[in-house]
């Protein structure tokens, strides 16, 4: 019952964010509200702060993991940017067309207090802990990661048109939408497994939050900066 309620909250948040959120501020508000409701469901289910990776020791461990994970992601992104074969990944119209102010809002507010807060609290916090207590770690990781992949069905529908690397693989027309979505779901489900493992090994929800934020926000910032400073055309 409680797991069903958590999934229903996420389904509603997904629909609201993809259909009704007309501004970044509204997106953040929806995510914060959904996060609060999920934490209430976690309390209803009897989960503790330690179960969620948010107890004092978990916070301390997460703060030790965070700078290492951010540094690794930044290094990987810079290597990709330096390689000709990897540069198309940074040709993304969604970021390139933004003003500096909107890019900074996205990287420093929308992503951490919207995307990362909700998705990590949901999939590596509340759902993972609820499933782990009932079915064990392997099932918790597998099921929460599958749901994380499905969460990205709607947001991935236009990636083949906005991102040059994806468009070159699947085409930027309507025929490319279905394979793009399928690959996005599989890739984000796999990413969910990695994030769950970071959560398990670190004992902290802050560690996957830091990894998630660095991939999204640093990638976002580089996609904005690269066409202006490094990429031709």
Image: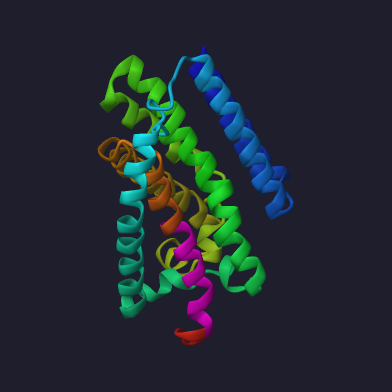
Which residue is drawn at the image coordinates 31% and 50% (left, top)? Answer: 65
Q: Position of residue 51 (x, y in %)?
A: 38, 25
Residue 179 magenta-highlighted = no
Looking at the image, residue 168 sits to the left or right of residue 84; the answer is right
Q: Position of residue 191 (x, y in %)?
A: 35, 46
The relative height of residue 82 versus residue 156 in the rendered view (above or below) is below
The relative height of residue 92 versus residue 201 in the rendered view (above or below) is below
Quarter holding residue 127: top left
The relative height of residue 172 versus residue 69 in the rendered view (above or below) is below
Which residue is drawn at the image coordinates 43% and 22% (left, top)? Answer: 48
Q: Residue furthest top?
A: 1
Give the magenta range.
215-228
Q: Nearer the viewer, residue 108 or 20?
A: 108
Q: How many marks?
A: 0
Q: Nearer the viewer, residue 46 or 102?
A: 46
Q: Nearer the viewer, residue 20 or 163?
A: 20
User: How are the residues colored?
Assistant: rainbow
In the rendered image, is residue 107 in sight? yes
Quarter holding residue 102: bottom right
Quarter holding residue 37: top right
Magenta: main secondary structure equals helix
Which residue is drawn at the image coordinates 47% and 48% (left, top)? Answer: 181
In the rendered image, is residue 173 in sight? no
Q: Position of residue 60 (x, y in %)?
A: 35, 42
Looking at the image, residue 69 sits to the left or right of residue 112; the answer is left
The relative height of residue 149 versus residue 45 in the rendered view (above or below) is below
Q: Position of residue 74 (x, y in %)?
A: 36, 66
Looking at the image, residue 151 sits to the left or right of residue 29; the answer is left
């Amino acid at each position: 019952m409680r797991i069903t309620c958590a999934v229903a909250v996420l389904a509603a948040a997904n629909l609201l964010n993809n259909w009704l959120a007309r501004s970044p501020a509204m997106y953040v508000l929806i995510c914060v509200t959904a996060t609060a409701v999920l934490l209430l469901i976690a309390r209803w289910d009897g989960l503790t702060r330690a179960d969620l990776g948010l107890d004092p020791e978990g916070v301390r461990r997460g703060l030790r993991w965070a700078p290492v994970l951010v540094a690794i992601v930044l290094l990987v992104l810079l290597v990709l940017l330096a390689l000709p074969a990897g540069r198309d990944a940074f040709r993304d119209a969604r970021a390139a067309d933004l003003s500096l102010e909107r890019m900074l809002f996205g990287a420093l507010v929308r992503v951490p207090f919207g995307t990362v807060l909700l998705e990590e609290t949901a999939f590596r916090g509340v759902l993972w802990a609820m499933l782990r207590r009932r079915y064990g770690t392997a099932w918790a990781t597998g099921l929460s990661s599958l749901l994380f992949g499905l969460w990205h069905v709607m947001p991935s529908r236009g990636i083949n048109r906005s991102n040059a690397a994806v468009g070159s693989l699947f085409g930027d027309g309507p025929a490319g939408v279905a394979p793009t979505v399928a690959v996005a779901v599989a890739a984000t489900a796999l990413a969910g497994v990695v994030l769950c493992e970071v959560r398990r090994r670190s004992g902290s929800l802050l560690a996957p939050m830091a990894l998630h934020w660095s991939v999204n926000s640093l990638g976002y910032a580089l996609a904005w900066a690269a066409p202006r400073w490094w990429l031709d055309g």
